[in-house]
Amino acid sequence: MRRTFIFCVAALLAVSAGGAVPAASAAPLPTSQGAYGAVFRDDSGREIVLRGFNVAGSAKLAENGLLPFKSRADAAKSAQAMRDLTGANAIRFLISWEGVQPARNTIDYGYLDRAIEQMREFTDRGIHVLVDYHQDLYSAHLFDEDSWYDGDGAPKWVIDLGDYPDESCGICFLWGQNMQNNGAVREAVYDFWRNRYGVQDAYLTQAGAAMRYLRQRLPAAAFDKIVGLDPFNEPFDGGLDGRSGVEWEARYLMPFYQKIRAKMDESGWATKPAYVEPLVFWNTAFFEQGGLSTISPLGTRYVFNSHYYDGARITLDPTAAGDGTYASAMSRIRDRAKYLATAPFVSEFGNSLHSDRTPWMVRSMYQGMDAGIRGASWWGSPASGGTVLSNTMWHWDIYSGQHEEPGDGWNDEDHSVVAVNSSGAVVPRLDRRVLDRLYPSAVSGTTLAFAYEDLARSGYAGAGTQQAWLTVPASLPTVRALASGRQYGVLVWRGTTGTTELHLPGSFAPGSTAVVSDVGAVFGVPASGAVSTALEEGSATARRLLVDAGSGVHVALVVNAAGGTVTAAQLAAARSELAAWRAQHFPS
């Protein structure tokens, strides 16, 4: 069903008083309404959290035709597995300037048709799509055929316009160092930002043509699922000319984004925000410049779109991640978005699956995006964490380990959280407990606090340590006993009349899930009632938890009690403890 987008606060408040609604249809938009700043809301006024993955690094490869999938059938296989295995409701879909505009006066509409086919396999399953114009190191055509490194993005005709030196990164341990050390890469992107040879004009023209075509060719229901455009992945300067990073962003990056915004408006995308990224190294612990920190507030026609990779642990820091490791990094993203008066989005995060530290690094990153503070402190200070961050993890590649071109996807990266096994099934490479998470996908009202204990192990394939980070204090003895040694989550929200939804991980079978809330307390969640379950759109196995509540402050504790039982007396006692805890930390 086609729905009308909502922009103004008055209209938003008017619709939020409606009754229970089905899963969101239209793409969510950033709004100024929220306890901690701007959040995403759907056209029913519900606060939306987007969770999913990038599809996929394989779009950087010629073998895939510069698209995430070799065929529509592969896209369907990937979309179904993602929905079933993780409950994801969003993807970041990679496309390439080179794919769209292989020659200066040519738009490859066949390429866009194939992209549309692949996107629709996700939108038809209820998954939102962020269209991402991806580049890394600016272009593949800057690199020698025998180079260990490679790039993607700009087509060959663009590179042929310049007289660039032979590429060389010198002594580089990571491909990203090419942005600082490779003269060919730096000169070419320097020219882009200054529009030498008219290359930025050409970029804007092709982006407008691509957006118009997508708007025309996608069915209305599918276009409604497009959340916006990421116009330039991981921008880097190519040369600051003696300026600071924040000065460079103001002089070159923000004017480019404003031109993209105008192209979006001209191309039928006026109702969708631009998901704009700051300088790539703004929060990696190295070369930190930028962050859009001197830009005037963007407002809700833009989204503050950040990546997060742990530069220290990728390079020099030998320590493992744990409880609260990434709380401050994720809160920095929240704070910057709040300063810019728009919603935050983390469109890339993760770590190489070559590393034995990755499972808990990813777990801790999710914790930082969920709760915003360490689990050991959460129950005593639940309101201090901030909004739940929407995100797309890097990345989901069903061709992992099977690429014809060197490396797992690109430059020997190995970040894909899935692979295809010998039977042809898509299977997780990380513990499913860290990927298939409880999260508040749609809150009827405003989220006040959320935290989740996934109990994911520190190693691969079930190996390593299991340790709870979200520990319940002794002052809540029944809740503590109910949650001890179990996966569980807690959501607190200030409600409006309607249905709040949480994705229910596959390990939370309805018959063995306990829900304790002021709305009701059950062990074994039924298919109807104030607390109930339903299938996720597009899946026959993934489920969501539905809680119907009215105005006021509500709390819901959701526990995976598989292998055990929960008595009526325990439910009643836990409900009483939660009510007192809610009154203490969230007075009406």
Image: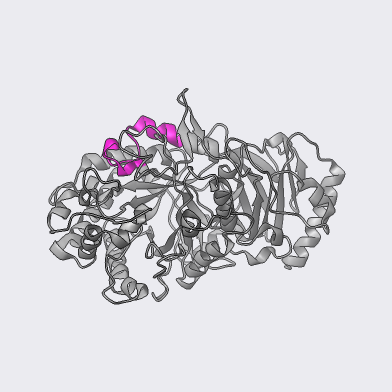
Q: Is residue 513 magenta?
A: no
What is the magenta segment's predominant secondary structure?
helix
Q: Quadrant of residue 543?
A: top right
| 141 lies left or right of 404 | left
The residue at the point 26 percent across, 39 percent down is 62
Along the line of sight, which residue is nearer the eye, 110 or 423? 423
State the extent of the magenta-drawn residues as a range.
Answer: 58-80
Q: Is residue 77 above or below residue 345?
A: above
The residue at the point 81 percent across, 61 percent down is 580
Along the line of sight, which residue is nearer the eye, 426 or 34? 426
| 291 lies left or right of 491 | left
Q: Is residue 407 visible?
A: yes
Q: Quadrant of residue 505?
A: top right
Q: Report x, y in % for residue 390.
A: 51, 55
Q: Is residue 38 visible?
A: no
Q: Report x, y in % for residue 47.
A: 55, 57
Q: Quadrant of the N terminus?
A: top left
Q: Report x, y in % for residue 325.
A: 59, 59
Q: Report x, y in % for residue 123.
A: 42, 42
The residue at the point 33 percent across, 37 percent down is 117
**Residue that sits furthest to the right in the current view:** 569
Q: Is residue 74 magenta?
A: yes
Query: By what rule are the colours in the image chosen?
Result: one colour
